[in-house]
Amino acid sequence: MSRALRGGRGLLAALLLPVLLVAAWWVLTADSTSFYLPPLHDVFARFPEVWTPERIRLDVVPSVLRLGAGYALALVIGVSLGVAIGSARRLRAFVEPVLEFLRAVPPTVLVPVFMLFAGLGDTMKVLVIVSGAVWPILLNTIEGVRAVDGTLSETCRCYGIHGPARLRHLVIRSASPQIVAGMRQALSVAIILMVISELFAAEDGIGYLLIQFQRGFAIADMWTAIIVLGLLGIALAMLMRLFEWRTLRWYRGLREAQRGRS
Amino acid sequence: MTTTSQDTTGGRRAGAETLLEVRGLRKVYDGRVEAVRDLTFAVSRGEFVCVVGPSGAGKTTLLKCIAGLLPPTSGDVVLEGSPVAGPPPGMAVVFQEYGRSLFPWMTVRQNVELPLKQKRLPRDRRQELVDEALAAVSLADVPGSYPWQLSGGMQQRVAIARAVAYEPHILLMDEPFAAVDAQTRADLEDLMRSLWHRMGVTTVFVTHDIDEAVYLGQRVLVLSSSPTVVLDDVAIDLPVERDQLTTRSSARFAELRAHVFEQVRRAKRERGR
């Protein structure tokens, strides 16, 4: 009962500010005569016409697919490289300076480079997403794997838990709080890069639509595209939260127990 | 350094088969710090041996060398006739840091079962062993809990259950009860006695607590301060059935305790020199 109450209150608190902001936007733009900032009312009115099922199929789905592919690839590369680098002290000393350098290169400046090598198609766009999203996952995984507890590691050795079983039961699980933190950062990076990759020489996608609307002075339509991007971001962030809540339940419990005891 | 009780080969029963042999074990860290100088002793099959020594006597180093977790600088550890060059298959270890030796992302049951899966035991057999082991440590009612939901003593019982379910030939325990409160500690000591009694598993139990060593063991090895040698090997001729109240208040217990205490104090004094 009290938990439900607390949950309800939490939901209310989480929704309060967004609702207030939308209300403020609504009220402040209600009498707007600015061409670039149409009343929110007019923007909402455009939704059914702009975001037809056909449009969702032709533009939203390709965006989301590329995002998914790029994010999944970044996850696989980031975690596997991270585990390898995090487990080997010498390798780490060797590659870490290079990683710092590569991470410092903004992925957006790589878009023209990727266009040269991978053309203008989906491959380029997926690569752009990977090039940005891989870093938070990789660096966090390295940190997480480094911090695997010595006693747990010895326990594994004693009971003959090595190789793939050790990776699965010890290394990945033990590093999972950091890996998930990296995944969360990577998600927002990936969404940004999804849009950016579609601003350059694209044929479909939400970012592509956004630019088309802006160039065609369909300003209200452009605003709907921005809102759709925002909603997509919220939906994915919520999925992320759900995933985190499920996979890191043990971690929250452990932390709470440690706080309670100290 | 040898004392009277050692020339009677300590408490080793004559004719019993030697399970573990430590010969001339020496461990030097980083080529400078000599933790263990020269340790030689043997443990018979089915024996319960306690190892005591002042803190910093290299007890943990010794245990890790026996467990194959640390390579000795020189000397040998031989378990069941074969030299130990890595954790041997028939061995289980219980560490002091119970909170850090259980997998916090696994339930109690999963923690106990994982080594058995690794041993590739069939599901039915695993189930049976896990149930038996949890019942043996009186934790049959919490298989679905996570370790961090349990008290320290219960967590250590999970670690013991995991070791027991593994059906080891030798059980190594590194100050397993040092971090729990006194009452829990007494309960865990009795649990260990009864488990050993029932299973007859060879046990090497490292502790800094002299009373605990005398109460638990059939034999107590007294280590010197670092660099470590075996100072004494005391046979504990207390009755097999032991009880926290009567055993600890018996005259023989007091004598043995005083004897071991004297050895440990000597070890500390010699270090001070």
Image (spheres, rainbow, N blue to C red):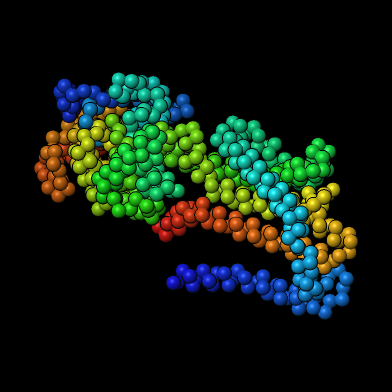
Q: Is residue A205 above or below residue B23?
A: below
Q: Residue furthest front?
A: A54
Q: Quadrant of the C terminus of chain B?
A: top left
Residue B10: which quarter of the image? top left
Say if residue A45 shows up in the picture. yes
Task: Give the vertical position of B230 relative to B215 (above or below).
Answer: above
Residue B184 position within the rendered picture, expressed as x and y whole percent measured from the top left? 27, 51
Relative depth, front residue between B202 and A168: A168
Q: Is residue B104 above or below residue B67?
A: below
Comparing B32 with A71, the one in front is A71
Q: Position of residue A124 (x, y in %)?
A: 77, 42
Q: Residue at x 19, y 34 (%)?
A: B218
| In this picture, residue B5 sits left or right of residue A206 | left
Q: Quadrant of the N terminus of chain B?
A: top left
* Residue B220 seen in the current view: no
Q: Residue, x 42% and y 60% (percent of image)?
A: A260
Residue at the far left in the pictured view: B251
**What residue is drawn where x is 29% and y is 23%?**
B80
In the rendered image, residue B257, in percent from the top left (x then y), is placed at 18, 40
Horizontal and vertical percent for residue A68? 67, 48
Query: Image point 26% across, 47% down: which residue?
Result: B135
Image-based side of A50 in relation to B37, left or right: right
Classify residue B117 as left or right of residue A199.
left
